[in-house]
Image (cartoon, rainbow, N blue to C red):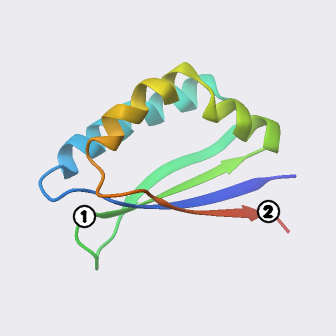
Amino acid sequence: MTIGIIATLKVKPGKESEFEAVFRDLQGVVAKNETGCLLYEVFKSRSQASTYVVMEKYKSQADLDAHRTTPHMAAAGPKLGATLEGRPTIEMMDKV
């Protein structure tokens, strides 16, 4: 079953460039190493300053579980966390 995720992240004011650089690097590593990840993109809100939305799509729950435990996610976590203002809001979805 295909799984979709929408994560909404609030970035600390002044940390937007840092967040975008870390995410861009992570995005490249995910695309290169995770064949089960079909989409991993970030978008910046036009109406809410410092708000980003990450859209993800995985072939299966196993692919999502694998994504969460990769070394590159573990390495990026503290870097991304340092730019965030609180925890992201995560919406999990199943393809119909």
Q: Residue at position x 60%, y 22% from top?
A: 33
From what the image shows, is residue 18 above or below residue 34?
below
Q: Which residue is mark 2?
A: 94
From what the image shows, is residue 9 above or below residue 65?
below
Q: Quadrant of the C terminus?
A: bottom right
The numbered mark, 1 or 2, whose residue comes first in the sequence reads: 1
- Secondary structure beneath dot 2 equals strand
Q: Amino acid at mark 2?
A: Asp
Q: Quadrant of residue 61?
A: top right
- Secondary structure beneath dot 1 equals loop
Q: Residue at position x 28%, y 76% from top?
A: 48
Is residue 77 shown to the viewer in this render?
yes
Query: CA gap, disc 1 to disc 2?
Result: 28 Å
Q: Is residue 14 left or right of residue 43?
A: left
Q: Residue at position x 49%, y 50% from top?
A: 41
Residue 36 x %, y %: 73, 35
Q: Which residue is mark 1?
A: 50
